[in-house]
Amino acid sequence: MPRLSMWRDHKSLDYQFLDNQISEYFIVGGTGIIIHKYIGPASAGKPDDPTYQNPDTSDKNIKERVIQDLLFLENRDRKYDDNVYEIRGVYNVQDNDFDLSQFGWFLSADTLYLTFHLNDMIRILGRKIMSGDVIELLHQRDEDLLDPDAPPINKFYIVQDANRASEGYSQTWWPHLWRCKISSLVDSQEFSDILGTADEEDSLKNILSTYNEEINISNKIVEAAEKDDPIGGIGLIQTNSEHLLEGKTTKEWDPVIDYGENINSGSAFPANPTQGLRFIRTDFKPPRLYERRDNIWIRLYDNIPKGWLERTFQSTDLVNDTTQSSVNNEIFTSRQGLSTVLDPKNKDS
């Protein structure tokens, strides 16, 4: 009588029996999960472009294994299957706790690990779940929102990594489970095929994205700062119209008007200063007034520019350039958004 052995060099009837029992476990106790199948980049690029992998220029031959941008090794313009697939999966539900063990705050439950039945997944999806697929959890649907007019929406995740689960190997040593590492979906270019565009009023992009709210909050903060701190400091502290007390104050000033004399300026302090000498450092932005006392240059105050933004952000002259230029009798505004100048959809321009 031969020795008993569960191992076979092929998937025997023992494997089929165990696989059916494991599949039944997922059907009975698993949760329904919708898979948005990634089918490849929306475009493989120009045929003569060396930074793209383009075995065939026809869109029908662009597959998941094609890399759109070989320089950055990424697929920014992703295409997803119009059909959605429902699969049963299992994972451990976690509480959303803040992890303070590192610099900053991190959500410890922001990453989940989902387990699927391997053969059922291949039978339904046609392949294994891979990085780039989008997962939609039906049971995480939030219907009790603070805004009664806001539509309920499911929770979306992006697959970051996938591999065979260590607990999915049965007595026959053949794998039965597929384990995926997923994280919360964010509003980015890669998922525009699923989320839609901002022009669509009821698109998932407008529902999920917090971009407009964050911009409005930022604008309100700037408005409040300009109102509460119109001169950018604690003000000018004076005992009379000609004498300035020591302190780090700010205001818009002119050396001749404020002091009745010209004050030397430059990018470095003078070599042999006298006591009480005032000097303007022009290499600071805004220019800063100092006074020599003993062996110390005491900072008196800064000469603030016109507005609160200019005093706060040193790049304001570049990013908020409101001037206009005339080219061939045509007026152009210096400050323009990239979206008005460059068309990201036009790959041949």
Image (tube, rainbow, N blue to C red):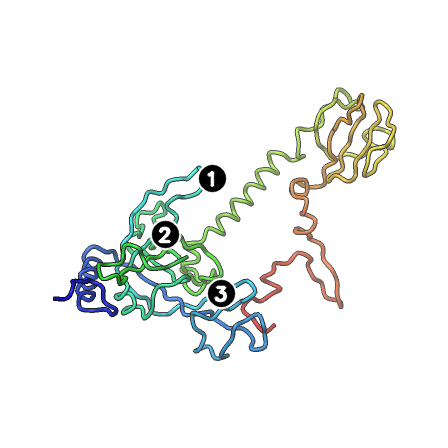
Q: Nearer the viewer, mark 1 or mark 2?
A: 1
Name the residue beneath numbered marker 1: 102
Q: Are marks 1 and 2 in contact (CB under 8 Å)?
A: no
Label 3 and label 1: CA atoms lie apart by 30 Å
- Residue 311 in percent (x, y) is at 68, 40
The residue where tag 3 is placed is 75
The label shown at residue 150 is 2
Q: Position of residue 231 (x, y in %)?
A: 67, 34
Residue at image coords 46%, 56%: 187
Q: Position of residue 286 (x, y in %)?
A: 73, 39
Which badge, 2 or 3, is on the more N-terminal residue? Answer: 3
Q: Quadrant of the N terminus?
A: bottom left
Q: Earlier in the sequence, mark 3 or mark 1?
A: 3
Element type at mark 2:
loop
| Residue type at the position of mark 3 | Asn
Q: Is residue 312 left or right of residue 183?
A: right
Q: Residue at x 49, y 61 (%)?
A: 189
Category of crowding for the residue at label 3, using alpha-carbon neighbours closer than 10 angstroms: few (below 14), some (14–19), many (at least 20): many
Gap between marks 2 and 3, in whole Å?
32 Å
* Real-space CA distance between mark 1 and mark 2, rounded to the nearest whole angstrom: 35 Å
